Image: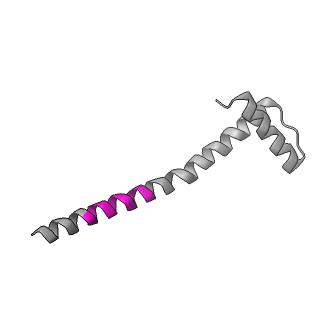
Amino acid sequence: MISKEYLDKFKKLYKDKYEITLNDEEATELANHFLNMMEVLIRPKQKRSQNKRNNAEIEERSTYASDRI
């Protein structure tokens, strides 16, 4: 659920950009669509960077283990 404060900010940004005034229902729907899209775009990037960190840790452990043999 989007707070009234953020909904009002979204409505203002939308009006400034597109010169269209949204009611609360329209603004809520569009803001939710926007947030869902951003979540989809951001989530895979976080997983990729997490995988890179995991791979680096595995490589580091492997190197450490190889050096000890």
Residue nearest the viewer, comparing 25 with 53: 53
Point out residue 3 in the picture as x, y percentages from the top left corner: 69, 29
Would you say 47 lies left or right of 4 here?
Answer: left
Would you say 69 lies left or right of 57 here?
Answer: left
Residue at (83, 32) in percent of width and height: 23
Q: Is 50 one of the magenta-colored residues? A: yes
Would you say 16 lies left or right of 51 here?
Answer: right
Question: Where's the N terminus, which quadrant?
Answer: top right
Q: Is residue 61 above or below residue 21?
A: below
Q: Is residue 16 above or below residue 62?
A: above
Magenta part, dominant SS: helix
Q: Tell me how many marks there are.
A: 0
Q: Quadrant of residue 36?
A: top right
Question: For the magenta stretch, what is the residue range?
Answer: 48-60
Residue at (22, 69) in percent of width and height: 63
Residue most toward the right? 19
Point out residue 11 in the picture as x, y percentages from the top left corner: 81, 38
Picture colour scheme: one colour
Q: Quadrant of residue 32?
A: top right
Question: Where's the C terminus, which quadrant?
Answer: bottom left
Would you say 28 lies left or right of 13 here?
Answer: left
Point out residue 24 in the picture as x, y percentages from the top left corner: 79, 30
Residue at (23, 62) in percent of width and height: 61
